[in-house]
Image: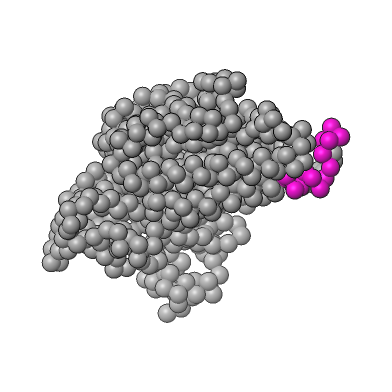
C-alpha cells in the first residue's frame, strides 16, 4: 500500500486534501533549502560535491522529511539524534525561538567530526508557544582541525561540539564563532559554509512554521502523525510479502588502513511476519584504523539505508518507514564503537555493509537483489603548496558501477549506496583551484561484471600534477571485488597507478597517507564496476555486440567473459 492510498481523516482532524498538501509541502521545503545551500556555500565540497543533507524532525526528534538529493547516511538518523540530544541537554523549557544549536559529537552522531548538524526549533502559533519540530541540516565542515587518517582516537580528529548554541534567542554567540574560526585550517571557506547552513536552517524554519500555521498547529501535527503511520503500514506490507526466515551474507574490507588484516563484514537478516531485524552480532570488532562509527551513526544508519533500498518503496523516508526495522548490535563493533574510537574515515565500511545486507536476500528474493556495486569510496587527495606558496587540498572521489538486476544492466558510474546525489567537482573548477591537469575522464572498458544483465562500468581519471605534493588514496574491496548474483560473475575492482615523470617507474596503490609526487607525475585512477546478474551465457548477443561497438567491452574480454561464439568481431 502506498502512503497515499489511505487518506481517511485521522481522528477527525485532517481531511485528505490537507494531508496531501502537507505531505508534499514538508518534502518540498527540504528540497528548496537543499537547492539554496548549493547556491550559497563557499566550499566546492558543498556547492558542487553536495556533501550535506537537509532534514525536518518532529518535536521529539523523529524524522519527518528529508531532501531527496542529500546524503542518505546523514539524514537517516543523524539529524534526529542531534535534536534529541539538544532536548536532553537543555530541556524544552530552555529552547527558545531564535536558538540555533550545533552537534558533531561522536557519542551522539557516531561519525567523523566534520559532519556537523545545525538545527533550530520551530515554534508556531500566535505566541510562538507550540513546538512543531526542528529544522536541521548536516553539513560536512571542510576542516575542523585534527589529523586524519593518522588519528589514533577521536581526540586527535578535531573540534568536538556537543549540543552547543550558536545563536540564542535570535542573537549570535560570538565566542562560539571565534572558537570555530580558530580551530580550522580553512577559516574563510568554513565560515562561509556555516553562514549558508545557518541561512538554510532559518529559512526552513520559517517555511515550515508558515505551513503549520496555515492549517493550524493541531492539524499540522495530526497530519504528520498520519503520514508516519501510513509509511509504517506501507513498510510492514512489503515485509509481509517476503517469506519468514533468517538470511545471511558476508564480505570483507581489505584492511583498516593501519594493518593488512582483512575486516569481516557479516550480517544476518531475520524476517518475521511484518518486522525485519538486522543482526550485526558477527560484525568485526572496532579497529585501530579510523574506520569506526558509533551505534547510531554507523549500525543504525547502515541498517536504515539498506532497509530503504530493499523495502522502502517510493514514499519519502521518515520515521514511520523505519518502525518495523529492528537492530541487534552489541557494543564495541566496528559499527558501534565507543565515542573515543578514531572515526575520521567512519563511512568507508558503509557501502559494503549495505551491499551485504542486500546480498543476504539473493536466495529468497533474486528479483530484488542486484550484483554487488564497486563499494569503495575510491577517494584520492592531492595536498601541498602551489607555486604562489598557498596550501591546497584537492579532494576528489571516483565513480563506479552498480550491480546488474533482474530487469536491466547495472547503472553507473555513480557514487556508492552511502552517498546519494553527490556529484563530481567539475574538471574546470579543479584545474582553476588546484595545480593539477586532468588528461582523461572516461568510462573504464571491461570493468563491468559479466552476466545476463551485466554490471555498470567504472570510470578512469588521469591527473598530471604540476607541483610536488602528496597523494592520499582510499581504495578498498580490491581483494573482495563486486560480486555477481543469480549466476552472474564479479566485476573488476579499482586501484590507483602512479606513472613517474619521464616514463619511468609505475607504482600501484590502494591506500596511502601521503605518497610523494613530483611535478609531471601522472596519477591514473581506475574505479571498479558492478557485478553481473544471471549467467553470462544468457546474455543477448545483440547486447554484447552493442557493448563492443560502444567501447564498453573489448573483443578480447567478450571472448573471455561470454565465449568465442559470442564475439561478433
Residue 205 visible, this angle = yes
The answer to whether residue 258 is left or right of residue 42 is: left
- Write the residue at 58% across / 27% down: 96
User: Is residue 20 rendered magenta in the image?
Assistant: yes
Decide which of 199, 480 is in the foreground and name it: 199
Q: Residue at x 49, y 41 (%)?
A: 198
Q: Position of residue 324 (x, y in %)?
A: 66, 33
Residue at image location 77% in from the left, 44% down from the top = 19
Instruction: Report which quarter residue 142 is drawn in.
Output: top left
Q: Is residue 315 magenta?
A: no
Quadrant where the C terminus is found in the figure: bottom left
Residue 502 sits in which quadrant? bottom left
Is residue 494 placed above or below 347 in the rendered structure? below
Q: Position of residue 522 (x, y in %)?
A: 22, 62
Where, quadrant-wise, is the N terminus in this rendering? top right
Q: Where residue 449 appears, x then y in whole percent?
A: 45, 59
121 and 146: which one is in front?
121
Q: Residue at x 21, y 46 (%)?
A: 514
What segment is highlighted magenta in the picture? 10-23
Residue 26 is left or right of residue 473, and the answer is right
| Residue that protrudes farthest toward the right in the picture | 12
- Residue 492 in the image, given as x and y percentages of width and height: 38, 57
**Number of numbered tags placed on the structure image:** 0
- Above or below residue 25? Residue 229 is above
Q: How is the image coloured?
A: one colour
Tell me, yes or no, if residue 371 can be seen here.
Answer: no
Which image quadrant is residue 217 in?
A: top right
* Most foreground residue, 387 or 128: 128
Query: In the displayed structure, does residue 121 sit left or right of residue 42?
Result: right
Amino acid at each position: 500500500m502506498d502512503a497515499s492510498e489511505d487518506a481517511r481523516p485521522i481522528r477527525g482532524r485532517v481531511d485528505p486534501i490537507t494531508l496531501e498538501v502537507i505531505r508534499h509541502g514538508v518534502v518540498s521545503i527540504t528540497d528548496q533549502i537543499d537547492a539554496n545551500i548549493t547556491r550559497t556555500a563557499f566550499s566546492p565540497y558543498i556547492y558542487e560535491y553536495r556533501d550535506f543533507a537537509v532534514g525536518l524532525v518532529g518535536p521529539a526528534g523523529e524524522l519527518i522529511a528529508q531532501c531527496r538529493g542529500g546524503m542518505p547516511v546523514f539524514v537517516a538518523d543523524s539529524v534526529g539524534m542531534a535534536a534529541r540530544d539538544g532536548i536532553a541537554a537543555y530541556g524544552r523549557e530552555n529552547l527558545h525561538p531564535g536558538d540555533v544549536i550545533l552537534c558533531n559529537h561522536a557519542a551522539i552522531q557516531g561519525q567523523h567530526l566534520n559532519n556537523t548538524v545545525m538545527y533550530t526549533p520551530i515554534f508556531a502559533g500566535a505566541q510562538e508557544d507550540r513546538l512543531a519540530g526542528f529544522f536541521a541540516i548536516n553539513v560536512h565542515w571542510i576542516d575542523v582541525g585534527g589529523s586524519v587518517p593518522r588519528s589514533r582516537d577521536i581526540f586527535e580528529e578535531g573540534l568536538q561540539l556537543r549540543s552547543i548554541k550558536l545563536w540564542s534567542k535570535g542573537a549570535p554567540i560570538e565566542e562560539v564563532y571565534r572558537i570555530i574560526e580558530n580551530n580550522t585550517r580553512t577559516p574563510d571557506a568554513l565560515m562561509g559554509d556555516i553562514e549558508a547552513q545557518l541561512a538554510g536552517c532559518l529559512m526552513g524554519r520559517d517555511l515550515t512554521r508558515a505551513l503549520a500555521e496555515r492549517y493550524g498547529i493541531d492539524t499540522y501535527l495530526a497530519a504528520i502523525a498520519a503520514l508516519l503511520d501510513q509509511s509504517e503500514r506501507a513498510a510492514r506490507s512489503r515485509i509481509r510479502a517476503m517469506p519468514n526466515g533468517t538470511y545471511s551474507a558476508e564480505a570483507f574490507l581489505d584492511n583498516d588502513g593501519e594493518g593488512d588484516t582483512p575486516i569481516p563484514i557479516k550480517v544476518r537478516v531475520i524476517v518475521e511476519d511484518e518486522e525485519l531485524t538486522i543482526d550485526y552480532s558477527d560484525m568485526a570488532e572496532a579497529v585501530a584504523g579510523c574506520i569506526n562509527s558509533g551505534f547510531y551513526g554507523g549500525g543504525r544508519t547502515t541498517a536504515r539505508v539498506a532497509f530503504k533500498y530493499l523495502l522502502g518503496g517510493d514514499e519519502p523516508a521518515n520515521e514511520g518507514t523505519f518502525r518495523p526495522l529492528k537492530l541487534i548490535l552489541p557494543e564495541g563493533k566496528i559499527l558501534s564503537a565507543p565515542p573515543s574510537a578514531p572515526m575520521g574515515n567512519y563511512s568507508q565500511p558503509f557501502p559494503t555493509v549495505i551491499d551485504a545486507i542486500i546480498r543476504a536476500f539473493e536466495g529468497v528474493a533474486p528479483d530484488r537483489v542486484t550484483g554487488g556495486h564497486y563499494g569503495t569510496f575510491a577517494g584520492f587527495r592531492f595536498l601541498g603548496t602551489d607555486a604562489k606558496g598557498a596550501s591546497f587540498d584537492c579532494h576528489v572521489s571516483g565513480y563506479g558501477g552498480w550491480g546488474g538486476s533482474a530487469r536491466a544492466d547495472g547503472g553507473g558510474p555513480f557514487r556508492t549506496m552511502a552517498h546519494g546525489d553527490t556529484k563530481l567537482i567539475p574538471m574546470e573548477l579543479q584545474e582553476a583551484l588546484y595545480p593539477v591537469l586532468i588528461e582523461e575522464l572516461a568510462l573504464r572498458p571491461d570493468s563491468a561484471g559479466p552476466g545476463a544483465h551485466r554490471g555498470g562500468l567504472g570510470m578512469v581519471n588521469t591527473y598530471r600534477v604540476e607541483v610536488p605534493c602528496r597523494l592520499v588514496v582510499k581504495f578498498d574491496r580490491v581483494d573482495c571485488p563486486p560480486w555477481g548474483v543469480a549466476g552472474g560473475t564479479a566485476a573488476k575492482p579499482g586501484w590507483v597507478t602512479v606513472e613517474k615523470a619521464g616514463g619511468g617507474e609505475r607504482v600501484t596503490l590502494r591506500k596511502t597517507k601521503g605518497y610523494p609526487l613530483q611535478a609531471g607525475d601522472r596519477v591514473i585512477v581506475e574505479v571498479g564496476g558492478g557485478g553481473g546478474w544471471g549467467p553470462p551465457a544468457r546474455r543477448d548477443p545483440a547486447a554484447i555486440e552493442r557493448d563492443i561497438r560502444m567501447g564498453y567491452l573489448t573483443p578480447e574480454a567478450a571472448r573471455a567473459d561470454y565465449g568465442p561464439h559470442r564475439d561478433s568481431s
